[in-house]
Amino acid sequence: MSAPLPPALWQRLHDAVQSRTAHLSPTAQGILWTSAAGLIFSMLNALMRLLTLQIDPFQSQFLRYAFGLVVLLPIIWKSGYRAYAPKQIGGQFARGAAHTLGLCLWFIALPQIPLADMTAIGFTGPIFIMIGAYLFFKEPMRWERWLATAIGFGGVLIVVGPKLTFAQGGSGLYHLVMLASAPIFAASFLLTKALTRYESTGTILVWQSITVSIFSLPLAMYVWQPMNAWQWFGFLLCGALGSAGHYCLTRSFKVADISATQSAKFLDLVWSALMGVLLFSDVPSLSTIAGGVLIASATIWVARRESR
């Protein structure tokens, strides 16, 4: 992808998706949006891991979101800045600060652990998200949602549990750093859910790129190193994937309860395992396969229950 989609084509794609999913229940739509976001983010994470093996994590973090803003500029230009002016700029910066803190931990650990492990550790996020959604948004927590999340989390333990040690050259430290980012990202996503009450999906997406870029710039300047043309192109592609993924995720927050969609995130392990095999020759272990089957089963079951 050498250039962002033209605004007219983007609108046609958006309208086509809307028309084909209009007959589905809000929860089913939310699960589909979340699943699409997971696939896109898995491709993004694989590309970011390739880049962070060559470029400092903090520089990579800044460029990822700066280019995320670049690919949105044609859409902003067409609609005008006022269409993306936030109703409460303080909320946008609070969300950006939380997301930046989680990203700092995430990018530090990213080049040090396999993609499947990284994704599985990230599955602890839904636990924090559902608790926060219940406490702050009073979202109903039906037994199916709790059971699906508990089963999915059990699958995560099967995958990650044996690897959360310091036996292999201190790699366990980076697993714990990745784990520490999960509750921070959960706070960021809960803030996003709150913002969807009075901000459009496009506004939230644009201001995420702006605020994270602002907060990440000082760290990037401190470690900046020159890059070649392919690395610049890689970050441009990351910006496009990241913006598309966050658009899908924010749409899921807008159409359905945040807790109802979290089980679909467990499918991310399937996508990341495939990316690991294709790009890094990381063959999933038996525990990863067993955990993935358990996670996928819970996701399919709760999706069918919710669609009724």
Image (spheres, rainbow, N blue to C red):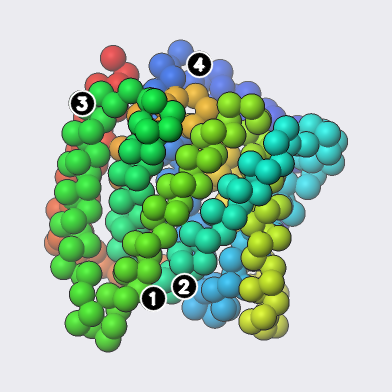
Disc ID at residue 306: none
User: Residue 20 vs residue 96: left or right?
Assistant: left
Percent across and percent down for residue 14 are 62, 29
Amino acid at dot 4: Ala
Residue that mark 1 sits on: 112
Measured in 3D between alpha carbons, the distance from the residue under mark 2 to the one under mark 3, in whole angstroms, is 36 Å
Percent across and percent down for residue 182 are 39, 55
Point out the tag, 3 or 1, that comes first from the N-terminus.
1
Residue that mark 4 sits on: 22
Q: Is residue 86 above or below residue 96?
A: above
Q: Considering the numbered disc 4 on the image, is that residue within a helix, a strand or a loop?
A: loop
Q: Residue at x 79, y 32 (%)?
A: 83
In the rendered image, the quadrant that contains the C terminus is: top left
User: Residue 252 vs residue 117: left or right?
Assistant: right
Point out the tag, 3 or 4, that comes first from the N-terminus.
4
Amino acid at dot 3: Trp
Disc ID at residue 108: 2
Point out the tag, 4 or 2, that comes first from the N-terminus.
4
Badges 3 and 4: C-beta atoms under 8 Å apart?
Answer: no
Q: Nearer the viewer, residue 228 or 41?
A: 41
Measured in 3D between alpha carbons, the distance from the residue under mark 3 to the one under mark 1, in whole angstroms, is 37 Å
Q: Nearer the viewer, residue 48 or 217?
A: 217
Amino acid at dot 1: Gln
Badges 4 and 2: C-beta atoms under 8 Å apart?
Answer: no
Q: Nearer the viewer, mark 3 or mark 4?
A: 3
